[in-house]
Amino acid sequence: MGEQRDSGETPHRGPVRPASADAGGDGSAGGGGRAQAAYDGGRAGAAYGGGAAGPSRSGRAAEVVSRSVLEDVLAGAVREVKPDEVAEGRAVAAFTAARDAGAHRARTRRRDDWRPREKRRTARSLKATLSVFLASLTLGGVAVAAIGAVDGQDRAGESGGHRTPSAVASTPDRAGTGVSGSAPATPAPADRPDTAQDTEAHCRAYEKVAGHGQALDSTAWQRLITAAGGATNVGAYCAARLDDTTATDAPGNSGSQGNAPKDTGGNADKNSGKGKSGKQ
Amino acid sequence: MGQGAEPRRVQAYDGELGAAVARAQQGDEAAFAAAYRLVQPGLLGYLRGLVGGDAEDVASDAWLEIARDLGRFKGDGAGFRGWTATIARHRALDHLRRQKVRPRSAALEQDVLELAGPHSTHDQALESLSTEYALALVRGLPRDQAEAVLLRVVVGLDGPAAARVLGKRPGAVRTAAYRGLKRLAEQLGPAEGVTDDDPRTLGEST
């Protein structure tokens, strides 16, 4: 295929003449022949994607012909490469030197990773995983961080929700430290009675936080406990509060925990749990 | 049109290339030489289109780096071609940058272009169009088009790999390759007498 239209010699400075394939490219072992087979036939005009295929099919035949000719010719550039023993020897020497110096034990950088597809899949799934993780933090942690963030806020639900992503990101399951951490951080005004929304948020978060000792020390918790009339009453108090609102579906995780306040509530637990599910 | 043919052939050698690279990474010298022979032609063709006469020098630099960093590479044969093309490209860009300081004689390019001009029929073009001439034309393209064409056609990378080498989106590379080829075709001059010919005929004239 290449014989017809061949080309000048490999040395670029040589005259360019329509000679038949020069001896080097012809049947010489190794590089030349193999390269030809490997890279032959650059007639993949349409392989360049829809952009190329569209116009060519619309009838610019001359152009298509020229392009495929061109591709063949360009692919011929590889056919012309005469095996250069000297250059090869130099490269192999560099390889040996590097190998013996232990350079080949170096780690793979991102730019060195050319593994097919599964690498891309990993990158994509990493992002997916990360976003799901953050989403679940947000959902589960909204209530938790809302306890801290709510203080000094006018509205519990909305702004608490908006503010949480940053606060929450650092508090996966360390709800205790997170809450007690954020509580002092939030401007805690002088005594402001909980708004109704505050209390609901607190109640929902209670389920999350119950069991994490430190969390219950925060100011917000203290308010809740006071409002409920004691720690043991929180469960029932919350049940009553939450039932009063239309939105009984607690966000994400709280709901999945079965709407049952955890152990710390003690006596009130079972009753409140049942009461809640009954209402639903 | 046989567009599937090229990738299939390349892939056949990619298997061999991948195996050679893996053995070389274990220390096998002969395997490294085999990988060199498989990769160098494409690399050199790419570099000729980028830097012209200094392609061999740039390729040498590239192979030093390839040989040194071989242990870092992870991937198959096709990936190796992409990885080596990236290294070669960096060396080429360094070279071009240095050259801006020391202007290279443009006379050489002109000689090449004059010796084998475009012809009006594609048969004649086939006969007399030299690779050197074509590469000289490619060098005259805007660089993004030149690179897209070279990586796809000469190095034989697929769309995503070429895009990665260039650090661009695949769509942009596709467009650049198309435009580059189109412009090259225009520079070759209209090919008369082929208006209604089925391009497939040409494609299959192996």
Image (spheres, coloured by chain):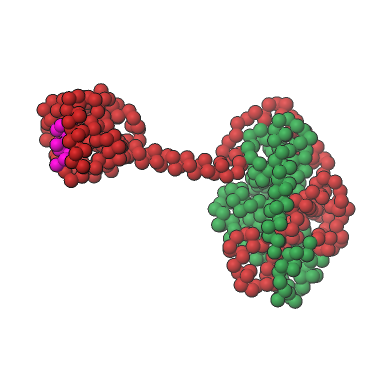
Is residue A239 magenta-colored?
yes
Residue A29 visible: yes
What color does chain A have in the rendering? red
**Residue B46 percent coordinates (x, y):** 70, 51
Location of the C terminus of chain B (image quadrant): bottom right
Identify the image quadrant of residue A128: top left
Q: Establish if A246 lies above or below A68.
A: above
Q: Residue B83's x, y, as percent?
A: 65, 43
- Residue A174 location (% of width, % of height): 32, 28
Left or right: residue B128 versus residue A279 is right
Q: Is residue B87 magenta?
A: no
Residue A210 in the image, given as x and y percentages of width and height:
25, 27
Residue A16 appears in view: no
| Residue at 78%, 38% in the rendered image | B33
* Residue A99: quarter of image: top right
Q: Residue at x 27, y 41 (%)?
A: A251
Q: Residue at x 27, y 35 (%)?
A: A258
Pick the residue in front: B107 or A268: A268
Q: Say above or below: B191 vs A86.
A: below
Position of the N terminus of chain B, as image quadrant, is bottom right
Q: In the figure, the green chain has which letter? A: B
Name of the residue lying farthest toward the top: A213
Compare residues B142 and B150 and report the one nearer the observer.
B150
Q: Would you identify the image quadrant in which residue A169 lies?
A: top left
- Between B2 and A70, the one nearer to me in the picture: B2
Residue segment shown in magenta: A235-244
Q: From the image, give the main secondary structure of the stretch colored magenta.
A: helix
Residue at horizontal 16%, vertical 43%? A245
